[in-house]
Amino acid sequence: MFQLMILIFVLGYLAIALEHPLKVDKAAPALLISTLLWVIYILGAEKILSLGYSSTWNEFALHLSAGMTKENTHHFIVEKELLHHLGKISEILFFLLGAMTIVEIVDQHHGFKVITDKIHTTQKVKLLWILSFLTFFMSAVLDNLTTTIVMVALLRKLVADKQTRWFFASMIVLAANAGGAWSPIGDVTTIMLWIGGQVTTVQIITRLILPSLVCVTVPLIILSITMKGQVKRPSVEEADHENSSKGVQQLILALGVGGLLFVPVFKTATHLPPYLGMLFSLAILWIVTEIVHRNHDHDIKDKLRPSAIFRKIDTPTVLFFLGILLAVASLQSAGHLSLLAQKLDSGLGNIFLIDIAIGFLSSIVDNVPLVAGAMGMYPIASPEMIQVAADPGYLSAFVQDGLFWEFLAYTAGTGGSMLIIGSAAGVAAMGLEKIDFIWYLKKISWLAMIGYLAGAGVYYLQSLILH
């Protein structure tokens, strides 16, 4: 059963990768494997959990007097693990829904025209650099998922050709992941390390901004050599702008962007999950939009009211998120990821190699459980622990702001760019622009890998100088 779960995940992953040849939407196999994995898990619970790889079961079993019974394993999987993971996944889904709706409201009111009107260049290379660096710094302030949604919406107003737009959207994914890695609020994994106390704000910014910048700049330089020509902007019907005056466009854009920027402030001030801040921002924008259009005729209301805009949200992308995250959650709960982390530790034994391997793995498996596994395996080392350690030099990498944690933030944050479904930003771009998995693998993955390794090399050289 334990091995069967791996086989099902691999087969489902292949079905997702071959979405276009199979002509089956990726959301369908994602939902199918997520269901099958949890079914196999609960049917073979006793055999799977008896292997001892599930750290959560091992902790849970300490408080059981009756040991491993059918009732106890059922309670553990259904009442504890499944509901726990569903709660965490729901946070991401509601965050995604809120962000997509806010962006769609701004888009329907032509708020992005305020920005696109100021970008006059049609040179592919110049526009690519502008959008990539705008994404890089926006991602550090917002987060990589929200930034990608905003930038892809902006991109649709600037580039008409689908293949060219795929290149730009892919570079936005690379830039969003790189930008999120050096900010304590830019990526889910960095947030985890920041809240957990493994890294601090000033240190993570100063130590990772240069490697992250190299990670996105190297692919840009390569594309600058190979990419030629001009972009063609999509034609826009003048009648489309009649429903929104210049003042309304600016108001909705300001409220939309302000609402997105408010989310990290909300989280810092209240210590509540970010999705609540996103839903709050959506509620404010929703109320203002209703008030703005209350005296308009029914045709305009039906097009611009948020209740109508909700129908335009890409539901299959949201369901794909649900499926793939539930599938990975089953592997985490059953102990597959803990076993993987143990194999990395025993097989590599070098902090830099372990972190680089985690980065490569994060392009296949969600980086959140990988980082969570690393945080569980390696406690933050204290000065007292280092004094009595057999290898104090190795253990010093695990202190707060130690090499292991800093480099983990970089590798887990940027490694997911090597595959389109390796990061939340990539999945969002894939869903919004219908980017083909195989196309990304052929055209972008090698660029992302070169950037990833270049940034890793810069961090390693930087560590030799600073530590």
Image (cartoon, rainbow, N blue to C red):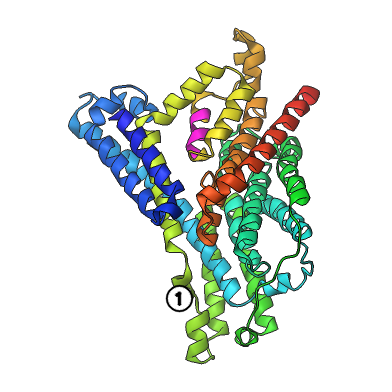
Indicate the quadrant containing the C terminus: top left, top right, bottom left or bottom right: top right
Magenta run includes residue 372:
yes
Q: Quadrant of residue 348?
A: top right
Q: Quadrant of residue 33?
A: top left
| Amino acid type indicated by mark 1 | Ser
Local crowd size for mark 1, using a 10 Å CA cut-off: few (<14), some (14–19), many (≥20)? some
Q: Is residue 398 visible?
A: no
Q: Magenta segment range?
A: 368-374
Q: Position of residue 162 (x, y in %)?
A: 60, 63
Q: Position of residue 216 (x, y in %)?
A: 71, 45
Magenta run includes residue 370:
yes
Task: Report the residue at 38% width, 43% height from top.
Answer: 12
Q: Which residue is mark 1?
A: 307
Q: Is residue 417 visible?
A: yes
* Vertical order, 158 against 84 (above or below): below
Task: Report the residue at 51% width, 62% height from top.
Answer: 98
